[in-house]
Image: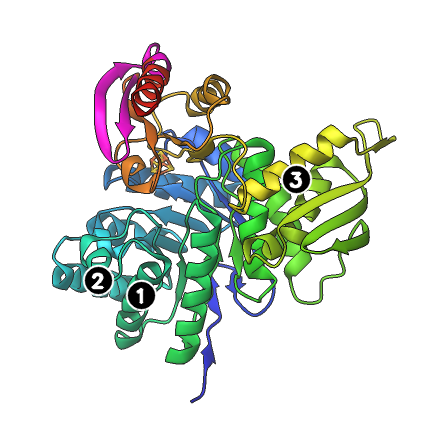
Amino acid sequence: MEIKNRIVKVGNLSIGGGKILPQSMCNTHTSDVDATLRQCLALSEAGSALVRITVPGPREVESVKEIKRRLLAEGCDVPLVADIHFSSETAIAVAPFVEKVRINPGNFNRDHAEACRQFSTLAGVCRENGTAIRIGLNHGSLGERITSLYGNTPLAMAEAAMEWIRLAVDNDFFDIVVSLKASNTVVMVEAYRLLAAKMAEYGHVFPLHVGVTEAGNGDSGRIKSCVGISALLSEGIGDTVRVSLTEDPVNEIPVADYLCRRYSSGSQLESSLSAVKVEGRSIRATYHAPSRERLLMELSCDFGKRLLDKEIDDISFDGDYAGADGRRVEIDKSLSDYLADELLQACRRRFYRPEYIACPGCGRTMYDLQGAFETVKKRTAHLKNTVIAVMGCVVNGPGEMADADWGYVGEGAHKVSIYHGRTPVLRHVPDTEAIDRLVELIQESNAADN
Ligand code: SF4
């Protein structure tokens, strides 16, 4: 059987074919046209090849049109991706004005036949307007129909994506990109590997957008993202990349750009890994790295996949890196131990601190997500064997936080809901008190278990 490797046009870009592209998403409210325009320009300037903006409902479609008009007036033709979560009407309304719409068609309607009908209508509108579609299915937001067949598993994610891919092909619509993100790197890598194999078997291989969703921030967010994304890119899986951080989205671009340059075909990026010693199932590596951030990205890419795939069990490293003033700084034992711990946790091989899930925030976030996440991390750092999620909104947060033990979920208007597993245990808590309540609940629960 002939396999068709699809290349998808998104505005002035071709997605697929070997060059991997970085992208990011605004965390502004789309109705705030000035702020969203500024962030689109900043992201494009930083190197984001596409910029995604949230379109919660039909009211924001006018804002999108104005943002597009003003971007073009500024000479910026960066393709815009409209992020739609539930409403096919909104997707259909905005499709003529953007280069791509990102949807989870399973969320269009509980009735699968009706969701299929709405997806086919959207595909027709996109065909007329030359708009691409990203089918974006996240672990934790799969519909009941699929999870009842396959469980909440990587296989379920891949099978769900294949259903929509087949429907697109049946509709003669081929401008699709697919993503299957998860916060858990093992789940995410397995889901994409399964999907890549299933598409090849089907004979239509569509470009994949890859990312670790809700990766958090700081070193751990970067390491987790690099581990999951690099494992796939090193196998030729992935065409666009998002490093999803609970920070200013501009901070995502240098990490995404490193991954894209390292794994694009014909890349000649030099590594600062200078020696590797294998002792049983442990690795000792030596780096002469150009910067601390580059060191942790290289480390994650060089050894993350081997840890994820359980080819090795442990890692240590030494060498030096360039400090902020350009002088060489020796990698001391505390830095080596800390980064090794972070890498092992990102690969889910050893948990030395709580596991955090935090969304990057978007136009639906109505509170200081970044500040709250930092405080939650400080107040819970002593806990072990606990997964804590900090999410921007109640619309998608509870579904997206997947297997978290505890959830801190923004409701808007300075109120927060606290979840234990999938159950909301406190609602409408003022955000000035919510972190205290969360910590108390975790302590009470741990005391009851002991
Ligand atoms: S969970 Fe976070 S990123 Fe997802 S829609 Fe809500 S605020 Fe936006």
Q: Observer-nearest residue: 107 or 117?
A: 107
Q: Report the disc number at residue 340.
A: 3
- Which contiguous range is marked in magenta? 415-436
Q: Is residue 214 visible?
A: yes
Kindly identify the amino acid type of the residue bearing the numbered disc 1: Glu
Q: Position of residue 200 (x, y in %)?
A: 44, 77
- Front position in the image: 5 or 228: 228
Q: Quadrant of ligand 1?
A: top left
Task: Say which label, 3 or 1, has the lower sequence index.
Answer: 1
Q: Is residue 208 above or below residue 335?
A: below
Circle 1 crowding by C-alpha within 10 Å: few under 14, some 14–19, many from 20: some
Q: Which mark is residue 149?
A: 2
Q: Residue at x 19, y 57 (%)?
A: 148
Q: Is 165 situated left or right of 4 in this image?
A: left
Q: Quadrant of the C terminus?
A: top left
Q: Is residue 284 left or right of residue 18?
A: right
Which residue is disc 1 drawn over? Answer: 159
Disc 2 residue crowd, few under 14, some 14–19, many 20+, Cα 10 Å: few
Earlier in the chain: of badge 1 and badge 2, it is 2
Q: Residue furthest front?
A: 450
Which SS does the magenta portion mostly show? strand
Indicate the amino acid at tag 2: Leu
